[in-house]
Amino acid sequence: MTLQDTGLAAYNFAYLDEQTKRMIRRAILKAIAIPGYQVPFASREMPMPYGWGTGGVQVTASIIGPEDVLKVIDQGSDDTTNAVSIRKFFEKTAGVETTTRTGEATVIQTRHRIPEAPLKEGQVLVYQVPIPEPLRFLEPRETETRKMHALEEYGLMHVKLYEDIARNGHIATTYAYPVKVEGRYVMDPSPTPKFDNPKMDNCAALQLFGAGREKRIYAIPPYTSVVSLDFEDHPFEVNRFEQPCALCGAEGVYLDEMILDDKGGRMFCCSDTDFCEERRGEAESVSASNGEIV
Amino acid sequence: MQIPNGLDGQGAERHGRDKPLLSVSGVSHYYGDRIGCRNVSFTLYPGEVLAIVGESGSGKTTLLNCISTRMEPTTGEVTYRFRDGSVKNLYRMGEAERRFLMRTDWGFVHQNPADGLRMTVSAGANVGERLMAVGERHYGRIRETATDWLTKVEIAADRIDDQPRAFSGGMRQRLQIARNLVTHPRLVFMDEPTGGLDVSVQARMLDLLRGLVADLGLAVIIVTHDLAVARLLSHRMMVMKDGEVIETGLTDQLLDDPQAAYTQLLVSSILQV
């Protein structure tokens, strides 16, 4: 059943009108041309509140085509409210195929995680960004932060890291950890855990960042250098976990803590649900082919 | 009358000491129809301390802002001699270069320390910011330098992780001075650095400043309405009234034998205790 059959006014493909999409595409092209630079764009009202991914949705709507396969994750998970709603939104307004499989998707919209499975050429990762300006909490004036970016005055960013070490003895920033893109712009990687920062470096996929409320788009083209800021005597380190995933046994992945009961019971399992499920599926088929009873 | 080192002898033989560090010629600034400052010219030599005095509204701060690149003058030129000996017109330089100069070779001490400090980051980070801005990326070294400078300005080293919010007015002002001097600037601008401090704190502050200026061979342009401050710190003085310079000269000469009527009034207005 098409929308016309319902008697409702039809949406344009992927909700946004074509002029808006052109405007956003121009911003995206500029963002790709200047890696890490925040391009202002005329962010639209979307049928969802600010903070729920309006920036990411607008970017996705502007780049998605009928042949695309969309995956949406929220904190690594395919089945939380935000992910399910946005996936349904595009199923309804664009009629595109959706998936939870990282490998099958051509466009992946994400809230605060990068999938564990390595991304491939041709894939696009769209981040939802709440506050695009890495210097914001240190310098409240937008006029000043823009000037600082323009003149490459990034001493202040290290002041933040200095404060971290002075207070905690180590760099305690664990998410939205500032990076330098292609040796020029300092960029906020959106509130992804710093565990994911190394995945941004020299990534085969195109990475696009949309901040709807703040009206900014920025990008990391494929195979671009992304370096996490640090001190010589306090180098950048990713989060470490003491145990493997309780469900699939994966090591070296980002884990979520799950509270199991109110008696202190908990477990740690993959935050990337698709990665975890695929691993468990493989393990089952292996044991099945070995003739074991599963 | 005691004159701090500078004009005479000491260090004059060092390279470039005999050439002006900063030359100001014909600087005027208008706020619409109103005059901020008009047709001010002077030269400043390395290691020299120049005081600009005058009552409030006389254009002292406007002039200071014009020569420290914080505000573009309506007309006039300001040239500065860089460490490599090249002389450049400040307002012909790119903004990036100007801002770099501001945070390396220059310092600016505000009257209100809150304007010159980052109140929400620790004292150590306040001092270290300039080092990080010029590319220092070693935490241990930054901290060591910061501790060293805090000691120099008489702030206990164990206050390094406190925010300036927790400091008294005098301590904040000293911290601001440390923050400015950490990159070993050659020229420091001060706008009423002792304003708002009580007299005993002011006296210690002046003592400290005088020591630092002499030790580091700083050139300083200090704006003040307090003639006692000018007398203690400066070698030369400029008296301003209604946006114009009405008298210049050596500090002791000018204070002991004022020529212009207004300067005479100013000098005689000092409360004799």
Image (cartoon, coloured by chain):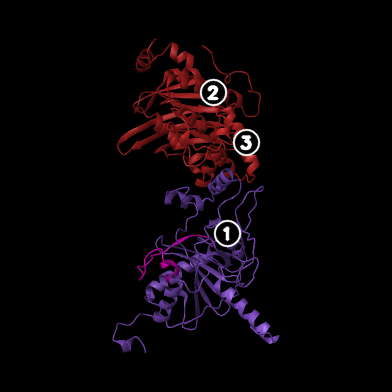
Chain colours: A purple, B red
Q: Using the rendered image of the protein, determine whether residue B185 is visible from the camera's viewpoint.
A: no
In the picture of the structure, the residue carrying the numbered disc 1 is A194
Horizontal arrangement in the rendering, residue B164 relative to residue B265 (left or right): right
Q: Are marks 2 and 1 in contact (CB under 8 Å)?
A: no
According to the image, label 2 marks what residue?
A: B208
Looking at the rendered structure, the kind of residue marked 3 is Thr
- Lateral position of residue A285 relative to residue A78, left or right: right
Give the quarter of the image for residue A58: bottom left
Identify the image quadrant of the C terminus of chain B: top left
Please state the horizontal and vertical placement of residue B232, each as a whole percent of the image.
49, 18
> Where does label 3 land, which residue?
B145
Q: Is residue A174 above or below residue B237?
A: below
Residue displayed at 69% across by 87% down: A291
Magenta stretch: give its range. A35-57
- Asked where in the image residue B179 lies, by quadrant, the reply is top right
What predominant SS class does the magenta segment belong to?
A: loop
Q: Amino acid at mark 1?
A: Lys
Query: N-terminal of the two: label 3 or label 2?
Result: 3
Going by the picture, which residue comes out furthest to the top?
B273
Q: Residues within 10 Å of mark 3 (few under 14, many from 20)?
A: some
- Badge 1 and badge 3 in a common chain: no
Q: Mark 2 and mark 1: span between their CA atoms?
A: 45 Å
